[in-house]
Image (tube, rainbow, N blue to C red):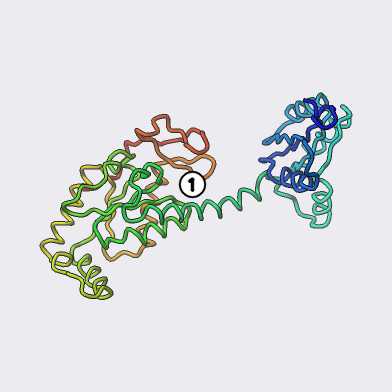
Amino acid sequence: MPDSANGKKEKPIYVVSGGKGLAGNNMVQSLLIQYPNNKVRVIIVPDVSDEQEILEVVLRAKKDEGLITHTMVSQDLRKKLIRLAQKHEVKQVDFMGGLADYLDQELGIPSLKTPGLFREINQRYFDRIEAIEFTLNHDDGMSPERLHKAEIILCGVSRSGKTPLSVYLAMYGWKVANVPLVHGIKPPQELFVVDPQRVFGLHIGYQHLIAHRIKRLRSLPRHDSSNYTDEAKVKNEIRNASFIFRKGGFTVVHVSNKPVESTANEILNIMNERFEYGGRRIRSPYQDTTNPAGVDEDSGQSLNIKSSSDSNTEE
């Protein structure tokens, strides 16, 4: 492709990496920004793991008269890339080798040589922030049309502990939605469309529930408590919730007089038994009617799902 300014063929810069190439690309872009009129193409070549892939990119760069930059943490692959580039007379810039060699010699301990490790560690932090944001935006029945995007769904009567449990799970990187079950009001239809193995019904004894509600009412002046704490009506609410749990085939978790940590651990143990995860642990581990192919909508990658025959649903 000719450069419109001088008619010369563009000479691209290849960013070769054993990971995703983000670090190398950032370094190249931070320099190119100093040349605002440049029309240099930057081509990222990620996940390079063997000599054949290195040879292919070297030959591409040779054909394009381009430059290869690289951030290979594997010393063996780095040396092969440099050797092949020299052999085929392709210019190359090693962003990693000099510093890695220095650290190897100075530290005297073996390197992990794991591509993408920095990105992976930082990704966990951003995954957690994303999960917390999702959970807060799907608290108390908000955005029911997006329930299929949640990894864990909690449902139960008012003051059964849905919100604190949701936030606690989100702190561990899980996208959680919770749905209140109110007697006389139909739950959202979406609750019965998603995979029931991801839906947990929080069952609480009526005495504990009334105690929680009375405590809550003390902070709400002039609140009518006739329905909220009436024993017969509370029992009726709990029966209605149990009916919904059975109807949906949801897993029942008893939360009476249990700390949030214990309930969260119980749910996560069940999730770990039911589902397998690939790549990011945060990837949604389910398959439903809105996503029948079992493909993650963001990454386009297939999801691995264990058999559902070991459902732990209680009545």
Q: Is residue 127 left or right of residue 286?
A: right
Q: How many marks?
A: 1
Q: Is residue 223 left or right of residue 193?
A: left
- Give residue 288's position: percent from left, percent from top: 36, 35
Q: Secondary structure at mark 1?
A: loop
The residue positioned farthest toward the front in the image shown: 5
218 up-or-down from 151: above or below:
below
243 up-or-down from 78: above or below:
below
The quarter holding residue 306 reads top left
- Give residue 310's position: percent from left, percent from top: 32, 39
| Front residue of this view, candidates 216 and 83 | 216
181 up-or-down from 71: above or below:
below
Viewport quadrant of the N terminus: top right
Q: Residue at x 69, y 41 (%)?
A: 21
Q: Residues within 10 Å of mark 1 (few under 14, many from 20)?
A: some
- Give residue 52's position: percent from left, percent from top: 74, 27
Residue beneath label 1, please? 282
| Front residue of this view, candidates 112 and 209 | 209
Q: Amino acid at mark 1?
A: Ile
Q: Residue at x 66, y 45 (%)?
A: 116
Q: Is residue 123 left or right of residue 101?
A: left
- Give residue 196's position: percent from left, percent from top: 31, 41
The residue positioned farthest toward the left in the image shown: 232
